[in-house]
Amino acid sequence: ALQAVLNHDYSRFVTQELKERQRFGYPPFKHVVMYHRDSSDLAQADRLRAWVSSVRQLYGDPTVDALPAQLVTKPRGKQAISVSLLTAKPKIWIRRTPADWLVDLDPESLYA
């Protein structure tokens, strides 16, 4: 892919990049749905993961993969929990977001 860019062959670059994204399940073939909640209690993440399992069974999304929860330190020492899903069906997850969680689709922070 890098060689294609260096040669200004953007068509080849896009073709190669899309093949790699499909192979690894990256956007636009799968999407990242990231849930956030201000808390340092990782038990909250365990409850969200249980919810993910029940929604997966109820709505039949075999494409979903839940990534391990992360504890993130925010400004002023506050902490937040972040749980990410990789799915081909993001609408199922966004529409059913628990009320006490924020949701972000394909967050820009993943690409920085």
Image: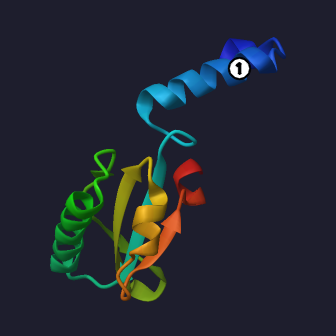
Residue 11 x, y percent position in the rendering: 78, 18
Q: 10 Å neighbourhood of mark 1: few (<14), some, or many (≥20)? A: some
Left or right position of 22 against 101: right
Residue ID for mark 1: 13
Q: Toward the viewer: 61 or 48?
A: 61
SS type, badge 1? helix
Residue at position x 48%, y 62% in the image: 91
Q: Toward the viewer: 19 or 3?
A: 19
Residue 106 x, y percent position in the rendering: 54, 56
Residue 71 x, y percent position in the rendering: 30, 70
Residue 44 vs 106, above or below: the answer is: below
Residue 100 vs 109, above or below: the answer is: below
Q: Could you tell me the amino acid type at mark 1? A: Phe
Residue at position x 23%, y 63% in the image: 58
Q: Residue furthest right?
A: 8
Residue 3 vs 102, above or below: the answer is: above
